Amino acid sequence: MFATTRRRTLQALGLGGAASLAGCATNAPTAEGSTATDAPAQTTTPKPVDTDRIAADPTDVPDPIDRDSAAEVDVTLRSEEVTAAVEEGVTFTYMTYDGQVPGPFIRVRQGDTVNLTFENAESNSLPHNVDFHAVAGPGGGAEATTTAPGESADLRFQATYPGAYIYHCAVANMDMHISAGMFGLILVEPPEGMPEVDHEIYIGQHELYTDKTAGTEGHHEFDMEAMRNEEPSYVLMNGEKYAWTPGVHGPAVTAGTDETVRVFFVDGGPNLPSSFHPIGSVWETLYPDGSLSTDPQTHIQTREVPPGSTTIATMNSPVPGDFKLVDHSLSRVARKGCMAIVRAEGEERPEIFDADPE
């Protein structure tokens, strides 16, 4: 996959030579069906996959911090280049943290000291590192953690300011590495913690730039020219087309109609902002840019999240149904695979919503 781009990266480092959108769009394909594409591209054969699922489990969020003092926290991140399915019949070789997109959710408390071990798998073809936006230090730790395949590095830092922050690879051609999946989120809780909710989920959006249009069968190679032109083949939530929808891996979460869901959202980019919106609902509370130093906004319909940033938002529904989390740049949903589902279960309440009034 990386024949040309790998050579350029190593030289730079001196290391060697479509979804149904009821209420928001019409004539869009369903998440369970095929996606409309542009002109047909030459098909190839998909490659064997290294994992059955690249999409991070959105419910794999560490429990809230329940201690009242700072502590030392040990964290290990491992960079892994793995081939996986973007959708049925389409494979791509991702760059990841711990074999998933986005990388693992890291949760600490303000004042904690983090002892990070960063590993670059021996089977990888490229150098990697990690830049934490939560780190007060040169490069967010990027230079300190830059490693060749088979190497590891240690970093120690204090989580000095609260909020939700992106972390990402920051070697040469970092835009390619982030696009291929190397980003995640670290939450630094304030000492007083966060308001209690019933469910927490973790969603990461990014663009995938390949040499074929979305849906073209076969193995997709990374396309530097498409990235320069900011013309992605896919815009994805958690690394796969419609990953957390009923037609693929199931809803991101199933909650009761009397329950609140908190969404931690990170836009890896590397280039495009997300107009993050819950179809059929609003964000009951929302912390812009993941800041926990200010009061949240309330009843927000759509929030722009820049690449390299985050937001924390809550939602609930008084009526049952499937609620779509989308980027409201809707061609990315209908044609490039950008959607997740939050399912609400409970009693119908026709006084609030009646799809078939007499």
Image (cartoon, grey):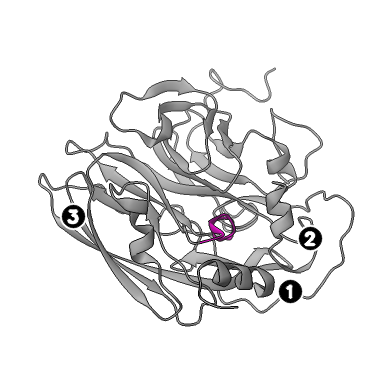
Residue at image position (53%, 57%) is 174
Q: Quadrant of residue 240?
A: bottom right
Tag 1–tag 2 contact (CB < 8 Å):
no
Q: Amino acid at mark 2?
A: Lys
Instruction: Name the residue beneath numbered marker 1.
Output: 46
Quadrant the N terminus occupies: bottom right
Secondary structure of residue under mark 1: loop
Q: Amino acid at mark 1?
A: Pro
Point out the frontmost of discs 3 and 1: 3
Q: Is residue 164 left or right of residue 97?
A: left
Residue at image position (57%, 77%) is 50
Q: What mark, if any, has residue 73 been given in the picture?
A: none
Give the camera-side residue of 299 and 268.
Answer: 268
Question: Start and end of the magenta stretch?
Answer: 172-180
Badge 3 or badge 2: first in the primary sequence: 3
Give the camera-side residue of 268 and 152.
Answer: 152
Q: What mark, if any, has residue 113 been given in the picture?
A: 3
Instruction: Name the residue beneath numbered marker 2.
Output: 212
Percent from the top left, x then y, of residue 318? Answer: 47, 27
- Distance in Å between CA atoms under marks 3 and 2: 44 Å
